[in-house]
Amino acid sequence: MRLFRNKPWFLLLPALLFLILPSYGLATAILESIRGTDGFTGEHYETLFASDRFTASFLFSVRTALIASVLSLAAGVLLTRTFSGYLEKNIPRLSVWLPMVFPHLVWGYIMILLFAETGLFSQLLVSLGWIESSNEFPIWTRDSNGIGIILTYIWKEIPFVILMLFPVYSAIPRSYYDLVETLGGSRWDQFKTVEWPRILPVLLEVFLIIFAFTLTAYEVPALLGTTFPEMVSVLSYQWFYSGSFEDRPLAFAAMTGTSFLIMLGALAAYLYLNRKRMRAMRGRL
Amino acid sequence: MKRNHLPFYFIAGLLFIAPTLLLLVQSFTAPWRFQRGEGLQFQLNSWSLLFSDPNLWSATLWSLVIGAMVLLMNVFIGLTSGKALALYSFQGRTIVESLLLAPILIPVLAVAMGLHLFMIRVGLADTWVGVVLIHLVPTVPYSIKIFHHAYSEVGRPLMEQSQMLGASVIKQFLTIELPLLRTSIRSVTFLTIVISLSQYAITAIIGGGQVITLPMIFFPFLDTANASVMAAFSVWFAILPLVMYIVVEGLLQLLPYSRKPWRIQT
């Protein structure tokens, strides 16, 4: 009997052992960011926030990640609700998920092929005579506005959004839409009352995953970003490898600060959903 | 009622299929110069250049070895914890569940930087084992999620049935759980190998430039190779998950109750 009671913990043992990796890694990163020559110190964070390079990079990263995740969510929702009927079938579904076979850095390279100043679109516009030479093509890769990074992420994350949203949409009964229609509701009402409450928890989860990823991933900005402003991941990576020992704590501080921002977002989303659920339980939606 | 299928195929073709075709066409043609009025020029040089690079083959091999190990550990951790979370109720289940999914949100770059010193201390830095361990961080939470969902679908009654009929734990696992979890194993295969193949920064930090996987030679290639070779290299990235998928599919055929493709279906 005792053995039976402990069985789930026994089964969870490998996963709990795995948890040591991320928690030890994060704890060390936090410790390294507040360790001074003797005892703990906040000096690394002071240096960090005083540096223009970091503040510019941080704001740029948050802005880029926000735009990329909001736009890919919006496009994903639009595509899923328009085409959810097709996604039930095998071949259309596989075609939508095709981009997921490629790593992000390969998708970044596709952007270079398409949007670089000598890329496909620029060449086509020149040969069509719409622009004189490829110099007139707007700079969309390795640009200081992060357009290349944003485009790559949106394009690459749309299939992921569809993958996460599709089960929710396919579980909504058709009759709910009919109900709203019979009661004289518009298509917007259908979206607001039938779809929105069901997709909101998934949307928040997917938003957090994509935001956290785009904010801190290294590969795409390394391929498509410029030197100023650079994404916080690229900056931290450089500090980590700069060779001088003064820069390494800065790398840890930058990554710790970014992690805290993500944690705050996750906490806010959790509390918001919880409050909504409590209200629904009390019958005041 | 006849629906117009054109919008879907247009959008899916443009957004999801065209980029793949673009890479394929570019890899078999010389770098494009449409602005000079040149058309497509077929060539195979890019592929032979790519394959003649000895670094490519060793990097491919290492990527496959690391990917396979990451996959094995993912399946093991995912199966055990997914089963525990889906079929048992115990105190602290919700907390454990959120803790196990939390690594999705933690920047893996921060984790890799933090683990670097530890890896040096235990002698795993600059080794492929260390790289496998760090690749677990961005993959395992997804596998746990997938297997958790799959075990919830299987449900407890089916397990109780086999237990009542006297099946051993191993027999139950081989004849009931694994055959029903086939789809999830396929999804996990794809996800883990693609995520593992995507990691440049954390492989560089933990592998210390000694463990050379495909992403590690992608950036140096970018500086020297032309568009055709790069396109061929990009296509090569997508072939590895397919190879892994076929291998896993072959292994799944060994399971009981598998439909054998060479048998005529009635």
Image: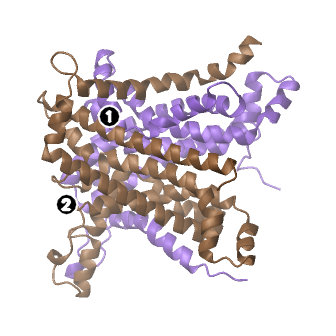
Q: CA distance from mark 1 to mark 2?
A: 25 Å
Name the residue at the right extreme. B165
Is B75 situated above or below A105? above
Q: Secondary structure at mark 2?
A: loop
Q: How many marks?
A: 2
Is B235 situated above or below A127? above
- Residue A204 position, x and y percent, is 50, 52
Residue, disc 2: A144
Same-subunit check for callouts 1 and 2: no
- Residue B239 appears in the rendering: no
Q: Is residue B135 left or right of residue B55?
A: right
Give the colour in which the image draws chain A: brown
- Of residues B74 and B51, the one nearer the viewer is B74
- Residue A101 position, x and y percent, is 46, 53
Residue, disc 1: B110
Q: Is residue A169 left or right of residue B206?
A: right
| Residue in the picture at 42% in, 60% down | A70
Q: Are marks 1 and 2 in contact (CB under 8 Å)?
A: no
- Residue A283 position, x and y percent, is 70, 52
Colour purple maps to chain: B
Chain letter for mark 1, please.
B
